[in-house]
Amino acid sequence: MLDVYELMNLEDELRPELEEKLGHILSRLNREERIVELLDLLGLAELLRVETGYKVQANGKIIIIGQSAIAANIILAIAERFGINKRRMELYLEYEDAVKFNFRKTQYDPTYSLIMVGPMPHSAKSKEEYGSVISAIENKEGYPPVVRLGSNGLKITKSDLKAKLEECINNGLIQAA
């Protein structure tokens, strides 16, 4: 691991190199189909998002997927407390469910409003060239919004689920009723 001074020196050396070679680097990564990987590493994946005009419906199904610390009946009760009918909820609460789940079925399907994710394997169906299935559905066009559950790493808890559902309703991603 580099110390602060070594990092500052590296930054000073990288800056002119990147300015000079950035176009070449981006072209090469694009040809190798690794540009998404670079932007993910830099935390800049949103730079590739292109508005297509496709919009999900706020009153559609909500998927909750990943290893859950709470039971399905409690999740459904929390959703109903927010005015979300339990028929709108699709729950896949085992760690391995995410390996088998075909996220592509939600792509460009307006019946899905939101995907809430908890702990799951990085490698799963629909991952393609991305580092994880979560990165894939967050960054590929046509998927419903993705909400990561957990405040310090992925975790499905009552308090976080309540907070994220309330936030999604307030932001118009989903609607009650």
Image (cartoon, grey):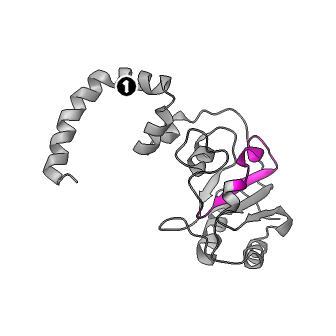
Is 93 situated left or right of 30 in this image?
Answer: right
In the rendered view, tell whether residue 111 sits above or below residue 92. above
Q: Position of residue 29 (x, y in %)?
A: 44, 27
Q: Position of residue 119 (x, y in %)?
A: 58, 64
Is 106 situated left or right of 165 in this image?
Answer: right
Point out the stretch of residues depicted in magenta.
100-120
Write down the residue under mark 1: 25
Asked which quadrant contains residue 42, the reply is top left
Q: Nearer the viewer, residue 42 or 96?
A: 96
In the rendered view, tell whether residue 157 sits above or below residue 30. below
Residue type at tag 1:
Ile
Please name the residue shown 77% across and 73% down the image.
76
Please name the residue shown 73% across and 42% down the image.
107
Quarter of the picture holding the N terminus? bottom left
Please name the residue shown 70% across and 61% down the image.
97
Q: Is residue 56 visible?
A: no
Please name the residue shown 43% across and 37% down the image.
38
Is 15 situated left or right of 32 in this image?
Answer: left
User: How many other residues sit within 10 Å of disc 1, few (<14), some (14-19) or many (≥20)?
Assistant: few
Question: Does the magenta-highlighted stretch encompass residue 80?
Answer: no
Q: Position of residue 146 (x, y in %)?
A: 63, 53
Q: Position of residue 47 (x, y in %)?
A: 50, 36
In the rendered view, tell whether residue 63 sits above or below residue 42. below
Q: Nearer the viewer, residue 148 or 79?
A: 148
Q: Residue furthest right?
A: 87
Q: Is residue 106 visible?
A: yes
